[in-house]
């Protein structure tokens, strides 16, 4: 049964989470029954059409490789396990990746015993006793969709993140992920390594359903308030994971960088200066010379514009500009600069 007209369709870049919930029995008369792998994908794809960021996402099919389902992009490799009891692994690649920037995402307990199949579009689908998970790799991220099929389904979905990742809920309801580099027991640098978009959920009529994030230890919990009158099932909940990184450069560091640029130095010289000025910078930018090249591309004048308040700047890297939680003052080759 094709359900694609049940919702209008979402697109997303960078890590999105959604999981499909089906009651194991005794569901109410208005519960929705998922009929196989392809219909599960149809429900998620249809709901995605009315997502606020519907035009900012391109799905990348997962391919079988070494016992997993893998999407290997220019900037990151996403590996989805054949057993949902294991976590999803995101391994950054290219010039932006460093030891601080990798990420794993554990799936909700209700789907961990699911048998996993691959849909025609390259989605990984796992149907458990209560929950069906639909996982789709995206350019720069991941969508783990959750379809709540009836009022007996749970309203709390927990996603386990690494113990050394700090989760902070922002004023707009989104969440930021950060990790701190430590050298000989001393914290030398904290970098934001990912962002989870403002939580979103809708029912089969396109009505918004109240939802928010909570933090429980190292877990991000999405709470979906679908236990209310008037809800038309299925309900699709959609948090979105984006990755990339940003770090703070103080006003004095920006001044030193500008001096090096004005002196006509090349990327290698500026890279060595950055390493001296910003301890731990190599833990987020495995190729600091590439970052230095981007700063040279910004130029002294634009860096000064970015630092117009003389309070320092945030520089970082992302390959999906639409997912930045701010408007960059300067952007070159995927690197950005914003004022503090």
Image (tube, rainbow, N blue to C red):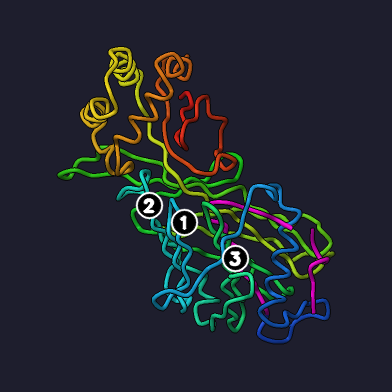
Is residue 55 toward the left or the right of residue 19 in the image?
right
Q: Is residue 309 visible?
A: no
- The 10 Å Cα crowd at callout 3, few under 14, some 14 to 19, many 20 or more, is some
User: How far is mark 2 from mark 1, CA to CA?
Assistant: 8 Å
Which residue shows up at 70% across the image and 55% down it? Answer: 10
Please name whichever residue, 315 or 184, is drawn nearer the observer in this view of the structure.
Answer: 315
Q: Position of residue 13 (x, y in %)?
A: 57, 51
User: How far is mark 1 from mark 3, CA to CA?
Assistant: 31 Å
Pointer 3: what residue? 156
Look at the picture and state if 169 lies above or below 251: below
Pointer 2: what residue? 93
Is residue 303 toward the left or the right of residue 132 in the image?
left
Q: In what element is the residue under mark 3?
A: strand
Per the rendered image, the range of residues in magenta is: 1-22
Q: Is residue 41 visible?
A: yes
Which residue shows up at 74% across the image and 61% down it? Answer: 47
Which residue shows up at 30% across the image and 21% down it? Answer: 253
- The 10 Å Cα crowd at callout 2, few under 14, some 14 to 19, many 20 or more, is some
User: How far is mark 2 from mark 3, CA to CA?
Assistant: 33 Å
- Of mark 2 and mark 3, the one earlier in the sequence is 2
- Of mark 1 and mark 3, the one earlier in the sequence is 1
Look at the picture and state if 16 lies above or below 298: below
Q: Mark on residue 204?
A: none
Residue contact between numbered discs 2 and 1, judged by CB atoms under 8 Å = yes
Q: In what element is the residue under mark 2?
A: loop
Q: In what element is the residue under mark 1?
A: loop
Q: Quadrant of the N terminus?
A: bottom right
Q: Position of residue 154 (x, y in %)?
A: 63, 71
Image-quadrant location for residue 273: top left
Pointer 1: what residue? 73
Q: Position of residue 144 (x, y in %)?
A: 57, 64
């Amino acid at each position: 049964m094709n359900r694609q007209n049940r919702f209008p369709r979402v697109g997303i870049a960078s890590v999105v989470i959604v999981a499909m919930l089906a009651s194991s029995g005794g569901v109410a008369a208005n519960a929705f029954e998922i009929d196989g792998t392809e219909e599960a994908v149809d429900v998620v794809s249809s709901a995605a059409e009315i997502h606020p960021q519907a035009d900012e996402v391109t799905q990348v099919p997962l391919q079988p490789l070494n016992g997993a389902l893998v999407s290997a992009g220019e900037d990151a490799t996403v590996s989805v396990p054949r057993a949902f009891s294991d976590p999803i692994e995101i391994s950054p690649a290219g010039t932006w990746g460093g030891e601080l920037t990798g990420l794993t995402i554990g799936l909700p307990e209700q789907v961990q015993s699911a048998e996993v199949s691959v849909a025609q579009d390259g989605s990984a689908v796992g149907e458990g006793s209560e929950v069906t998970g639909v996982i789709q790799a995206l350019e720069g991220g991941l969508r783990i969709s959750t379809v709540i099929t009836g009022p007996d389904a749970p309203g709390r979905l927990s996603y386990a993140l690494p113990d050394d990742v700090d989760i902070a809920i922002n004023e707009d309801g989104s969440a930021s992920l950060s990790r701190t580099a430590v050298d000989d027991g001393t914290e030398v640098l904290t970098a934001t390594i990912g962002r989870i978009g403002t939580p979103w959920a809708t029912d089969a009529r396109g009505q918004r359903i109240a939802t928010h994030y909570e933090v429980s230890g190292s877990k991000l919990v999405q709470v979906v308030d679908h236990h209310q009158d008037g809800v038309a099932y299925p309900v699709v909940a959609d948090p979105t994971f984006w990755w990339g990184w940003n770090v703070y450069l103080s006003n004095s560091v920006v001044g030193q960088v500008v001096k090096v640029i004005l002196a006509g130095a090349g990327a290698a010289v500026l890279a060595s200066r950055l390493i001296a000025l910003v301890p731990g910078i190599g833990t987020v930018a495995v190729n600091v010379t590439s970052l230095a090249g981007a700063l040279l591309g910004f130029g002294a004048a634009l860096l000064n514009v970015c630092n117009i308040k003389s309070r320092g700047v945030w520089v970082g890297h992302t390959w999906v500009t639409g997912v930045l939680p701010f408007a960059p003052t300067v952007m070159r080759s995927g690197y950005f600069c914003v004022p503090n």
